[in-house]
């Protein structure tokens, strides 16, 4: 069975004090033993998170990573640095990075390779804009993001996780219907089986992201190809995040 995952992307939110409270609330909750729970704080809060969550089942991820090993790249953080402070995961290609930092599939491919070569398990984010959905291009956009982003990446490294996040659903309150999300996830799994093989595609967790909350998570997570969620806004409050983490079918 594929791993069920709920990951909280905090984006550029929370003071250190607020982060401490949120981490401690999540760490002290009783969480479903079969699910993987992950927090993805800003860079400045990563050491706090890895320190406070050491010895728990909760993993820590970063929000982006440099495509370079090291050197004169002011403001960047390398995969080796993330691994050194105890991160296990990193987001690659979040739509806010694609949009505001002009990160394209080729750059994201280099970020993924950096992450994988340092033992990090990346969460590769893909998804269409509203204009692309209205032009009936959703599935072809997703395919291109996978083909270019995963070029020369095999399935035998650290586990790769995909997050399908329709751009029009992120932070907007407009959630994809379970059927819309499932159609995209089934297509992603099919595309992965072409890039890798059916077995590797079948083992790859595919998360849905975009306005998931405690009221809609159960219906989304019940879909056959949806293995959990990447949660933005609702991950900033422990009650909402923990209730989403508990909404998988028995
Ligand atoms: C996200 O940023 O990945 C996200 C899904 O945000 P939200 O849940 O707020 O839509």
Image (tube, rainbow, N blue to C red):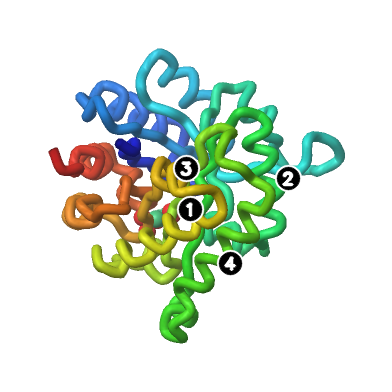
Residue at 48% over, 53% down = 193
Do tag 1 and tag 3 residues touch (Cβ < 8 Å)? yes
Q: Which of pointers 1 and 3 lies earlier in the amino acid sequence?
A: 1
Q: Which of pointers 1 and 4 lies earlier in the amino acid sequence?
A: 4
Residue under label 1: 193
> Which disc number belongs to residue 26?
none
Q: Quadrant of ligand 1?
A: bottom left
Q: Is mark 2 within 8 Å of ligand 1?
A: no
**Quarter-of-image position of residue 9:** top left
Q: Which of pointers 4 and 3 lies earlier in the amino acid sequence?
A: 4
Of discs 3 and 2, which sits in the foreground?
3
Crowding near the residue tagged with mark 3, few <14, some 14–19, many ≥20 C-alpha atoms within 10 Å: some
Q: Which of pointers 2 and 4 lies earlier in the amino acid sequence?
A: 2
Report helix, strand or loop for mark 3: helix
Residue at 64% over, 22% down = 84
Indicate the quadrant containing the C terminus: top left, top right, bottom left or bottom right. Answer: top left
> Which disc number belongs to residue 200?
3
Residue under label 2: 67
Report helix, strand or loop for mark 2: loop
Indicate the quadrant containing the N terminus: top left, top right, bottom left or bottom right. Answer: top left
**Quarter-of-image position of residue 74:** top right
Of discs 1 and 4, which sits in the foreground?
1
Position of residue 235 measured from the top left corner of the image (x, y, whole percent): 34, 44
Crowding near the residue tagged with mark 2, few <14, some 14–19, many ≥20 C-alpha atoms within 10 Å: many
**Quarter-of-image position of residue 114:** top right
> Which disc number belongs to residue 144?
4
């Amino acid at each position: 069975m594929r791993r069920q995952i709920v990951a909280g992307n905090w984006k550029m939110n929370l003071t250190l004090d607020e982060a401490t409270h949120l981490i401690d609330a999540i760490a002290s909750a009783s969480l479903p033993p079969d699910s993987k729970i992950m927090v993805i704080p800003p860079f400045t809060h990563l050491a706090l998170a890895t320190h406070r969550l050491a010895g728990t089942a909760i993993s820590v991820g970063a929000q982006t990573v440099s495509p370079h090993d090291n050197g004169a790249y002011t403001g960047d953080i390398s995969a080796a640095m993330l691994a050194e402070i105890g991160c296990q995961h990193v987001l690659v290609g979040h739509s806010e990075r694609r949009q505001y930092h002009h990160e394209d599939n080729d750059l994201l491919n280099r970020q993924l390779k950096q992450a994988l070569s340092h033992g990090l398990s990346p969460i590769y984010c893909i998804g269409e804009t509203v204009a692309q959905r209205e032009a009936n291009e959703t599935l072809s956009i997703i395919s291109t993001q996978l083909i270019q982003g995963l070029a020369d990446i095999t399935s035998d490294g650290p586990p790769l996780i995909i997050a399908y996040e329709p751009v029009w659903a992120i932070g907007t309150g407009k959630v994809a219907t379970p059927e819309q999300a499932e159609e995209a996830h089934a297509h992603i799994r099919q595309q992965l089986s072409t890039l890798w093989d059916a077995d590797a595609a079948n083992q790859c967790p595919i998360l849905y992201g975009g306005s998931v909350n405690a009221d809609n998570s159960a219906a989304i997570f019940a879909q056959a190809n949806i293995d959990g969620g990447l949660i933005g806004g609702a991950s900033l409050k422990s009650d909402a995040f923990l209730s989403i983490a508990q909404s998988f079918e028995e």
